[in-house]
Image (cartoon, helix red, strand yellow):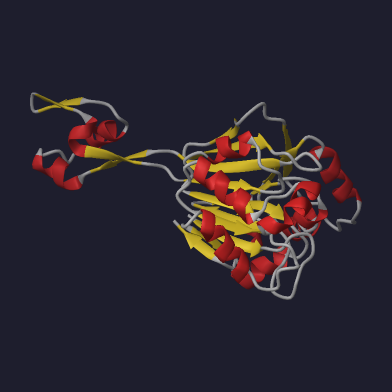
């Protein structure tokens, strides 16, 4: 699993920072969290194949988060056999995606697209596979906005040394034990815990464009990594409240209250030419934190 930051600026791109976009690679899945203007070029520079995108999670429909979607879809549609793309977003997403599709001419509209609108009551599961679940929750912004979590499922792993010590090498028996079932072997009952252990799944949460709220704490709870916006330093609290954004202190408090292991902040105002002041600021409140930068990669 690898997370790549494709843009770390707020509304306005700078020489050093593109607008919002992140790519999460997990096995055969390519999940794009927001797709600001220039995202597909950023993917080129980061060495990411754009055709690996099969899911787009839209936090909200401000331009700096979605301005690159139509160009990416047009590029993907030019393939002979394009992948199926699923787009998830808040209520209104179907209409807005259709507006984007109507705004350009597709020479060959070879696009396999599914669009889903999300309206969670609290923190809701909206997709589940054999390997992971996706969660969402409403945030408090100037327009409908969602936070997302990627939660990897726990996996039971065989302890090879223990299984060999018991003389178990047969795949069907090991398969049952790995599925959490007890077996009888050589007249003795073997439980899954005798020869295996549970590897805890990892959780990544993405919180953008909001003021502090309870649901941000709930969806981020026990995350291995929280990626949060931190548009301003605390002295710009008035601006943060006016435009409904988080400060570095706000992001750190969410991480603390949610028992998060690691915090990375992003989505910085263009007023901060260098992010050193933001990083030192957030570390004051949450020590295991850092600032993202364009093309930063986090491997799990």
Residue 114 versus residue 249 in the image, above or below:
above
Where is residue 16 shown, x and y percent of the image? 69, 74
The residue lying furthest to the bottom in this view is: 15
- For the point 63% across and 57% down, the residue is 22
- For the point 55% across and 65% down, the residue is 280
- For the point 63% across and 28% down, the residue is 122
Q: Quadrant of residue 25?
A: bottom right
- Residue 82 at least partly seen: no
- Using residue 214 as the reference point, say whether residue 118 is left or right of it: right
Q: Quadrant of the C terminus?
A: bottom left
- Using residue 159 as the reference point, say whether residue 66 is left or right of it: right
Residue 225 versus residue 123 in the image, above or below:
below
Where is residue 143 shown, x and y percent of the image? 81, 41
Where is residue 163 shown, x and y percent of the image? 16, 41
- Residue 64 at least partly seen: yes
Q: Nearer the viewer, residue 9 or 167?
A: 9
Residue 268 versus residue 254 in the image, above or below:
below
Q: Quadrant of residue 116?
A: top right
The image shows a total of numbered marks equal to 0
Residue 183 versus residue 258 in the image, above or below:
above
Q: Nearer the viewer, residue 182 or 259?
A: 259
- Using residue 27 as the reference point, say whether residue 114 is left or right of it: right
- For the point 86% across and 58% down, the residue is 107
Q: Nearer the viewer, residue 268 or 202?
A: 268
Where is residue 88 shown, x and y percent of the image? 70, 41
């Amino acid at each position: 699993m690898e997370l790549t930051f494709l843009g770390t600026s707020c509304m306005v791109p700078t020489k050093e920072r593109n607008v919002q976009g992140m790519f999460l690679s997990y096995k055969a899945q390519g999940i794009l969290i927001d797709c600001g203007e220039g995202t597909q070029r950023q993917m080129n520079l980061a060495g990411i194949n754009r055709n690996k995108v099969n899911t787009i999670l839209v936090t909200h429909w401000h331009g700096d988060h979605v301005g690159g979607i139509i160009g990416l879809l047009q590029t993907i549609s030019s393939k002979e056999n394009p992948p199926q793309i699923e787009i998830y977003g808040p209520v209104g997403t179907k209409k807005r995606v259709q507006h984007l599709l109507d705004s350009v001419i597709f020479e060959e509209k070879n696009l396999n697209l599914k669009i889903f609108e999300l309206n969670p009551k609290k923190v809701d599961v909206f997709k589940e596979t054999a390997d992971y679940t996706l969660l969402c929750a409403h945030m408090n912004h100037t327009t409908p906005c969602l936070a997302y979590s990627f939660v990897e499922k726990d996996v039971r792993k065989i302890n090879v040394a223990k299984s060999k010590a018991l003389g178990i090498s047969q795949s069907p028996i090991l398969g049952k034990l790995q599925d959490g079932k007890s077996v009888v072997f050589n007249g003795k009952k073997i439980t899954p815990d005798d020869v295996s252990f549970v590897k805890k799944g990892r959780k990544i949460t993405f919180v953008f464009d909001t003021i502090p709220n309870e649901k941000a704490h709930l969806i981020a709870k026990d995350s291995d990594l929280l990626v949060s916006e931190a548009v301003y330093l605390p002295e710009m609290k008035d601006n943060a409240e006016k435009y409904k954004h988080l400060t570095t202190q706000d992001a750190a408090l969410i991480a603390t209250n949610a028992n998060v292991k690691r915090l990375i902040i992003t989505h910085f105002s263009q007023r901060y030419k260098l992010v050193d002041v933001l990083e030192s600021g957030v570390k004051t409140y949450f020590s295991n934190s850092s600032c993202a930068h364009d093309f930063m990669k986090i491997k799990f």
